[in-house]
């Protein structure tokens, strides 16, 4: 999952924070994204500004 590391590093390079989250059940993502069941999401990467930086 080297590409995930590069995406997080790229976000941090832009002054953003990011983390990885891997839900145990991913069926809800297929429904939300209207993607075929043959695709299995492996990670969610929320990206944004950390709260402590906004204060």
Image: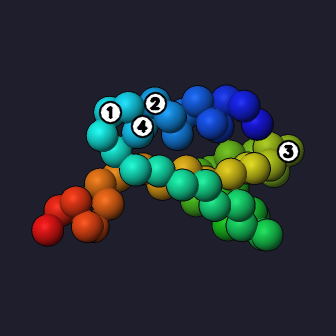
Q: Quadrant of residue 22?
A: bottom right
Real-space CA distance between mark 3 and mark 1, rounded to the nearest whole angstrom: 34 Å
Contact between marks 1 and 4 (CB within 8 A): the answer is: yes
Which residue corresponds to mark 4?
11
Q: Quadrant of residue 49?
A: bottom left
* CA neighbours of label 4 inside 10 A, class few (<14), some (14 to 19), many (20+): some
Quick one: SS at disc 1? loop
Real-space CA distance between mark 4 and mark 2, rounded to the nearest whole angstrom: 4 Å
Which residue corresponds to mark 2?
10
Quick one: SS at disc 4? helix
Q: Is any part of residue 35 visible from this angle?
A: yes
Real-space CA distance between mark 2 and mark 1, rounded to the nearest whole angstrom: 6 Å
Q: Is any part of residue 31 visible from this angle?
A: no
Which residue corresponds to mark 1?
14
Relative to 1, residue 40 above or below? below
Contact between marks 2 and 1 (CB within 8 A): the answer is: yes
Quick one: SS at disc 2? helix
Counting from the top left corner in percent of width and height, residue 23 is at: 72, 67
Contact between marks 4 and 2 (CB within 8 A): the answer is: yes
């Amino acid at each position: 999952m080297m590409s995930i590391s590069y995406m997080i590093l790229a976000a941090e390079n832009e002054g953003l924070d990011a983390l990885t989250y891997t839900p145990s059940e991913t069926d809800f993502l297929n429904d939300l994204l209207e993607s075929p069941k043959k695709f299995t999401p492996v990670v969610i990467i929320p990206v944004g500004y950390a709260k402590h930086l906004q204060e």
